[in-house]
Amino acid sequence: MILDEKSLKNHSRFLSRILRHKPELIGIVLDNHGYVAVETLLNALQNSQFPMTRAMLDEVVANNDKKRFSYSDDGLKIRANQGHSVAVDLNLSPQIPPPILYHGTAIDSLDGIWQMGLIPKTRHHVHLSGDVQTAIKVGKRHGAVAVLRVDTAQMVADGVVFYRSANGVWLVDTVPPKYLERLAL
């Protein structure tokens, strides 16, 4: 292991910020599908607060707890799997989700959710989890957590399209309140 746990987390967060939200911070440009050449990224990172070698980058990609990043098939490019606030087309195909998915959020956000549903805000999609534990983990980042059960079977029956990212996160444009129910934790 090249990076200790804290360094791995810090490098991963920085890489996530660059590949999902702010590529201009280190002077790179993502292609239409969110990729950047690994060599270009590594060169640009050398002048940042988190310089990396290819071995370090490989470690971040392999050991990121949320599997946020992936290489192109030839290993020459890298991108974030989802969660972008910059314009990219991840070229995902529609998928049929399991009948129920989950969304972790802050309790403080519930009033707005009951009015507007789940909306992507600055991102391209709403992110849904396949299990309650993952939803709890995601929701805890925002404060006291609430987990919402999403009736995806009914959404699919009503014609809503879902996608699944390379790391298994389910993506949808929005989730209206009628498909949501709060779980007791």
Image (tube, helix red, strand yellow):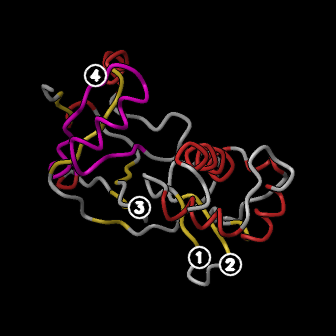
Three-letter code for the amino acid on which mark 2 is drawn? Leu
Residue placed under numbered mark 4 in the picture: 114
Q: Position of residue 170 (x, y in %)?
A: 34, 54
Q: Is residue 129 magenta?
A: yes
How far apart, in angstroms, are the residues tagged by discs 4 and 1? 39 Å
Quarter of the image with the C terminus is top left
What residue is disc 2 on? 76
Mark 4 neighbour density, 10 Å: few (under 14) some (14–19) many (20 or more) = some
* 180 is higher (above) or lower (below) than 35: above
- Mark sitting earlier along the chain (3/1): 1
Quarter holding residue 142: top left
Residue 97 vs 26, above or below: the answer is: below
Residue 51 pos. (x, y %): 77, 53
The residue identified by callout 3 is: 167
Circle 2 or circle 4, nearest the eye: 2
Residue at 32 percent of width and 15 percent of height: 111
Is residue 113 located in the magenta-colored stretch of the structure?
Answer: no
Q: Amino acid at mark 4?
A: Trp
Up the image or down, 129 lies above or below 179; here it is: below
Assign a secondary structure to mark 3: loop
* 1 and 2 marks in contact (CB < 8 Å): yes
Q: Which residue is mark 1?
A: 72
